[in-house]
Structure formats: structure tokens, C-alpha cells
Image: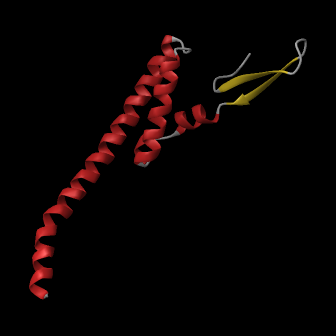
């Protein structure tokens, strides 16, 4: 029996021999232990993309799909927040730009 967070890989070396290896699913473990608020935009986007891929796979049961969807919403909110921060910074810099250009042309 597999524990939560493990997956099985079956390697078929010959038709009669199956070798089964259990490995920890690193991404799933890290996803459960990561606070989306601590991630960069790129990290949150990557996690969101992986969740979308897993949901598209349809290999999950309904409870797992709902859990993944809820986690995806958290990552989406993080991405939106980081984009909002970037947009605000760009707006501030853009508003300062005409004054800087004027200062440069007066100094020349």
C-alpha cells in the first residue's frame, strides 16, 4: 500500500519480470508544504501550470481534483498579486519619466 505522496514506477525489463520501485513524489510534497505567499511570480506560475496539467490528466479522483483546484486558486491569487505590484511600480516609474526627461533636456 502506498502512502500519500508516493507513486509507483513499474519498469518492465522482460515480459515475465516486473520490478516495482516506490518513490516519493517530491513536487506533491513540496506543494503541500509551500506557502504561496512566499513564492516569486515565476514559482507560483510554474506550480499553477503543473496543477492545470494534473487536472487535465483526469487521472485523479474527485476529492483530489477539488484539493488541487483549491490550491491552484491560491497560486493564481499569488500570480495576480505579483502582477498588480509590478503594474503599480511601472505606473509610478512612468509618471516620473516625463519629469526626468524634462530635467535632462534643461540640463543639456
Q: In which quarter of the image is residue 36?
A: top left
Q: Which of 51 and 77 is in front in this view?
A: 51
Q: Nearer the viewer, residue 32 or 76?
A: 76
Tell me what residue is drawn at x 68 percent, y 22 percent.
3
- Residue extending farthest to the bottom is 108
Q: Quadrant of residue 1?
A: top right
Q: Nearer the viewer, residue 86 or 29?
A: 86
Place of residue 77 in the rendered image (x, y in percent of width and height, measured from the top left):
33, 37
Place of residue 85 in the rendered image (x, y in percent of width and height, measured from the top left):
27, 51
Place of residue 12 in the rendered image (x, y in percent of width and height, measured from the top left):
83, 19
- What is the count of numbered marks? 0
Judge whether 67 appears above or below 92 on screen: above
Judge whether 6 appears above or below 31 on screen: above
Colour scheme in use:
secondary structure
Tell me what residue is drawn at x 13 percent, y 87 percent.
107
Judge whether 27 appears above or below 2 on screen: below
Q: In which quarter of the image is residue 101?
A: bottom left
Judge whether 97 appears above or below 73 on screen: below
Tell me what residue is drawn at x 41 percent, y 25 percent.
70
Q: In this view, does 7 lie to the left or right of 95?
A: right
Quarter holding the C terminus is bottom left
Tell me what residue is drawn at x 64 percent, y 36 percent.
26
Place of residue 97 in the rendered image (x, y in percent of width and height, measured from the top left):
16, 68
Amino acid at each position: 500500500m502506498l502512502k500519500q505522496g508516493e507513486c509507483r514506477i513499474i519498469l518492465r525489463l522482460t515480459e515475465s519480470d516486473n520490478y516495482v520501485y516506490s518513490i516519493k513524489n517530491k513536487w506533491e510534497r513540496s506543494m503541500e508544504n509551500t506557502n504561496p505567499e512566499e513564492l516569486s511570480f515565476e514559482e507560483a506560475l510554474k506550480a499553477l501550470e503543473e496543477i492545470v496539467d494534473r487536472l487535465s490528466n483526469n487521472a485523479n479522483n474527485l476529492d483530489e481534483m477539488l484539493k488541487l483546484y483549491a490550491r491552484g486558486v491560491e497560486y493564481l491569487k499569488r500570480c495576480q498579486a505579483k502582477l498588480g505590484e509590478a503594474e503599480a511600480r511601472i505606473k509610478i516609474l512612468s509618471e516620473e519619466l516625463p519629469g526626468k526627461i524634462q530635467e535632462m533636456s534643461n540640463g543639456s
